[in-house]
Image (tube, helix red, strand yellow):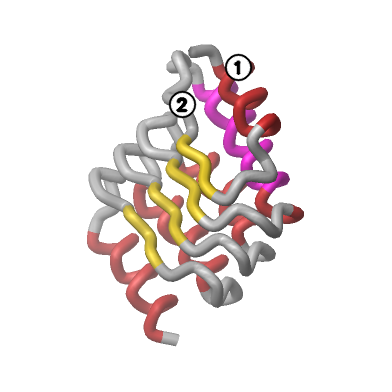
Amino acid sequence: MSAGSGLRFLEANAFRDSINLPVPDVEDEASSEEVAKRIGKSLKTNTRLKKLVMARIGINNKGMRLVAEGLRYNHFLRILNLAYNRIGDQGAHSLSECLRHNTGLLRLCLNYCSIGNLGAKYLSQAVAE
């Protein structure tokens, strides 16, 4: 699946309660960041989505920053699965900053996201507040 068709899938299903994003067939960073930018923008205004699975879609630390910007304002999403992305410590920092403001998220999956001790520290401090 191309990044464009993945974005169309997201937009077409924007009013569902749960979305499993298909794995895009992209390896370039620009396409991955465009996906993340559109997801972040959608999260700012979507009040119906309760569960979003973004596993294995190529989100990196820059993309996580873009998603986190939207997540910061979305208090309706309850479950977010980001497993198997290249978020890293910088992406974990972006995510931790939005978690300080987002009180709606109840479950967050970060398996195999290349998050080290520093990223884990950012996240644990945000959750503890």
Secondary-structure class at tag 1? helix
Relative image position of residue 119 (x, y in whole percent): 33, 60
Q: Which x, y percent locates residue 20?
A: 46, 37
Mark 2 secondary-structure assignment: loop
Q: Position of residue 98 (x, y in %)?
A: 56, 66
User: Seen in the image, is 107 located left or right of residue 97?
Assistant: left
> Badge 1: few (under 14), some or many (20 or more) residues near its Cα, within 10 Å?
few
- What residue is shown with label 2? 22
Q: What secondary structure predominates along the stretch shown in magenta?
A: helix
Mark 2 surroundings within 10 Å by alpha-carbon count, few (fewer than 14), some (14 through 19), many (20 or more): some
Instruction: Give 60 or 48, whichever is nearer the viewer.
Output: 48
Q: Is residue 3 magenta?
A: no
Which numbered disc covers residue 27?
none
Q: Which region is colored magenta?
A: 29-42
In this rendering, position of residue 66 left or right of residue 20: right
Relative to residue 69, is residue 113 depicted above or below?
above
Does 104 sit above or below residue 52? below
Quarter holding the C terminus is bottom left
Q: Which residue is mark 1?
A: 5
Which amino acid lies under the numbered mark 1 shown in the image of this protein? Ser
Residue 31 sits inside the magenta stretch: yes
| Circles 2 and 1: CB atoms closer than 8 Å | yes
Look at 47% across and 20% down and name the residue there: 24
Hey, what amino acid is under mark 2?
Answer: Pro
Residue, far bottom? 129
